[in-house]
């Protein structure tokens, strides 16, 4: 029996090594070499940032969501080196704007350099500081919000995202599964996310779903919500 027959889709789905290989295959088919994104990842690595950016396929997914939504104003919580910021900002029309919140001045400086190199600095504002301090100072409405910072505050971030939205605003929350740890109360990587899901049980201001994902970043998932 050939390898491919023996590892049918069902077995492959349980084999984490294949998730990464399939992501590389999809990237080769769908995502041509992108010098700007490549340079951003290189600058991030050079600066010692953790490699926890969205994957190329996830970045393109965010870009497409913003395009589909026709977003003019985007809010991001958690910039890191600006990899997801670049994908989102590229979806904006020339008069569109993106605000991104980042706690670390070091990360923000790397992101600023990456955005300048990408030719996007004119439409992106990095707000340095704890997002919970910045968010109350922002004025909506935003058309799309991407939540990807410290996971402990996910419930509060979702609340701000809704408050800063309008009917139809798209909200994405990254890393809501964490290898299944979302099932374990008390795990610091998912406790805040569990608070967010508890709030969603009675949250009537959004319609929401969550999808589990596998790929180069392992097993995780995201929430997709739309403000009513
Ligand atoms: N969205 C990025 C990855 C973000 S990683 C991408 O896909 O490219 C998470 C980022 O959130 C880190 O840079 C971290 O410094 C930042 N962060 C952590 N706590 C924060 C807080 N309280 N407020 C704002 N940003 C925070
Ligand atoms: C981590 C954070 C992220 O936003 C992510 O997408 C993956 C991992 C982390 O803090 O480990
Ligand atoms: Mg993330």
Image (spheres, rainbow, N blue to C red):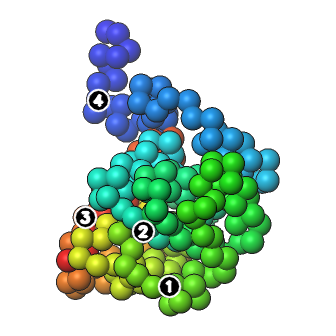
The span from disc 1 to disc 2 (Cα, nearest Å) is: 12 Å
Please give the residue where the numbered disc 1 appears in the rendered image: 138
Say which mark, if any, is on residue 195: none
Crowd rating for badge 3 (residues with CA inside 10 Å; few <14, some 14–19, many 20+): few
Taking the view exactly as shown, the residue that stands out farthest to the top is: 1
Q: Secondary structure at mark 3?
A: strand
**Which image quarter is the C terminus in?**
bottom left
Taking the view exactly as shown, the residue that stands out farthest to the front is: 95
Say which mark, if any, is on residue 73: 2
Q: Secondary structure at mark 2?
A: strand
Crowd rating for badge 2 (residues with CA inside 10 Å; few <14, some 14–19, many 20+): many
Please give the residue where the numbered disc 4 appears in the rendered image: 9
Quadrant position of residue 180: bottom left
Q: Residue at image x 50%, y 29%?
A: 32
Report the side of 173 relative to 36 (left or right). Answer: left
Say which mark, if any, is on residue 209: 3
Q: Is residue 69 visible?
A: yes
């Amino acid at each position: 029996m050939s390898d491919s027959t023996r590892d049918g889709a069902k077995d492959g789905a349980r084999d984490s090594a294949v998730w990464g290989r399939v992501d590389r295959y999809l990237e080769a088919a769908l995502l041509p070499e992108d010098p700007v994104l490549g340079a951003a990842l290189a600058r991030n690595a050079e600066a010692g940032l953790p490699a926890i950016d969205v994957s190329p396929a996830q970045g393109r997914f965010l870009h497409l969501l913003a395009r589909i939504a026709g977003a003019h104003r985007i809010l991001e919580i958690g910039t890191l080196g600006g990899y997801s910021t670049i994908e989102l900002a590229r979806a904006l029309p020339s008069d569109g704007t993106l605000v991104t919140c980042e706690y670390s001045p070091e990360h923000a400086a790397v992101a600023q350099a990456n955005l300048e190199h990408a030719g996007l600095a004119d439409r992106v504002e990095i707000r340095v500081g704890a997002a919970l301090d910045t968010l109350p100072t922002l004025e909506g409405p935003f058309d799309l919000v991407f939540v990807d910072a410290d996971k402990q505050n996910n419930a509060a971030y979702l609340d701000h995202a809704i408050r800063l939205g309008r009917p139809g605003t798209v909200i994405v929350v990254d890393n809501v599964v964490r290898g299944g740890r979302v099932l374990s109360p008390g795990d610091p990587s998912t406790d805040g996310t569990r608070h967010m899901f508890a709030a969603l049980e009675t949250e009537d201001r959004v319609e929401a779903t969550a999808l589990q994902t596998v790929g180069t970043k392992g097993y995780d998932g995201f929430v997709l919500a739309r403000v009513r």
